[in-house]
Image: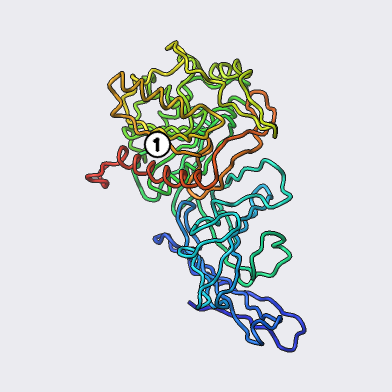
Amino acid sequence: MLIFQARFQNKLTSAIRRYSLIKFRFDSSQRIPFFICIQLVCKNHSGIMAQQQRCVQLSVRPSRALVDEKFKVLVQNASPGAELTVRSHLHTEDKHNWEAFGHYICDSTGTLNLCQDPSLGGTYEGVEPMGLMWSLRPVPGSKPGLRMRKTNVETPLEVTISVYQGHLSEDFPEQKALAAVLVERWYMAPGVQRIPVTEYNLTATLFLPPGPGPFPAVLDLWGGGGKLVEYRASLLASHGFAALALDYLTNKLTVETGKMMENDYFENAYKFLEQHPQIVGSRIAMWGLSFGTSMTFKMAAYSKVMKLRCAVCYSGSHIQPVNGSVEEILKYCAQNEGKTRVTENQEVIWHDILLPIPEDPAFKVDMGRLQCPLLLVVGQDDQNWPAFVSAMDMKVMMEKAGNSHLLNLLIYPDTGHLIEPPYSPHTRTSIFRDVTSKQLCMVLWGGRTVAHSRAQEDSWRKTLVFLREHLYDRRNTSNL
């Protein structure tokens, strides 16, 4: 690979930094379409290098990849034993700046490999090659309660990885980087199609994998914040599953009429997938997170229309008025608002509003009716929803009913409510707007950063395996 270097001109009294970008043409058949390398050449005038000029080299490979793929960061040609800071910086779509950084010491050859060398400090410690992503946090002075979420999945997250002399923890904009690399992190793989859907009065987006299909499909539901959230569905399509991201709380019909959607809204979404020419109608799963699990459990157990091949539920509960609609479930939760707790930092905890587990069968989904495999993912430090307690009750219910063989339960210690795709920044608290009251509050979601990040990576990998097992014929994946 050619690398253009800009050297300091001796006649200048101050160093002039220059850089060069090399792009290789995108090839949709390759997972790593192109590599970008930026080299900044620097001269140390402090006498440490004794008039010796060094060109610190930084590479990140792949520099263009899906968000759930790991990258390798390598620093070369630094001074032997040099103290360096490696930093990541992201300017988000909502105009906020996020950063992560680690403190390192080069080996005797002036080389630093983040896959092998430990960070001694910073936003993460130890050998953490992806710490530059999962430990991202708003820069000092940012607005409190930020949460990083991608809204336009047709563009990448653009992250700048930089190397600095010394162990730095602040004032990075005032410092001069020794080298920098631009990294693109995508939710949509090459060839994935994004198709807005309005049939059946749905507010939804369909993502289709590359190729003619037909594909198995996932109906994707997010939680009580509403809006059309697309990044998980687009990432699923990047792994070979058609996925329909569905807005069921702030959808167009609800906004225009003021009426919440009935249960047939979800059945219509299922029908849309079932009838689509590029989808295998007999191989449809449903995935719910948080409040989205309420409808996932309900549809899986009671719907006569939806014949799910399998279901995935993250951070949810089966506690709800069984015969209720979305609106009635929300009212049921609102009736228990008195159980809300508030921390000394004014962080809202909704964990207890569905507790204790009701004995009345009219107020929890009969899990014994479940006839499809279920993957249940819960964090033990979920402060927003009684996910762990609910999971234990569901497990007992299914054991008594004789269908516990359908249950796949993943429990993660020190893990909070917002279990996102791998390497997403951990959000312990954030500003949340309630869809019914429209009021803003600071919500405590829970989790400890390292453990939560491990859970995100592990649960995503196991979820993909689960979906492949039940939506694809593993004996012959070419014949769906």
Q: Residues within 10 Å of mark 1 (few under 14, many from 20)?
A: some
Q: Residue furthest left?
A: 475
Could you tell me which quadrant the C terminus lies in?
top left
| Residue at 65% across, 78% down | 42
Taking depth in this image into account, of 298 and 248 the one nearest to the observer is 298
Q: Is residue 281 visible?
A: yes
The colouring scheme, among rainbow, by chain, secondary structure or one colour, is rainbow
- Left or right? Give the position of 1 relative to 281: right
- Left or right? Give the position of 431 relative to 199: right
Number of marks in the image? 1
| Residue at 72% across, 61% down | 171
Residue 297: % across, % down: 42, 24
Q: Is residue 275 visible?
A: no
Residue 258: % across, % down: 63, 21
Taking depth in this image into account, of 328 and 270 the one nearest to the observer is 328
Rendered position, 412 above or below 13: above
Return the residue at label 1.
410
- Identified by mark 1, the residue type is Leu
Residue 436: % across, % down: 64, 23
| Residue at 74% across, 65% down | 174
Element at badge 1? Answer: strand
**Occupied quadrant, residue 404:** top left
Rendered position, 188 above or below 342: below
- Left or right? Give the position of 33 relative to 404: right
Rendered position, 29 above or below 477: below
Residue 48: % across, % down: 66, 81
Taking depth in this image into account, of 473 and 8 the one nearest to the observer is 8
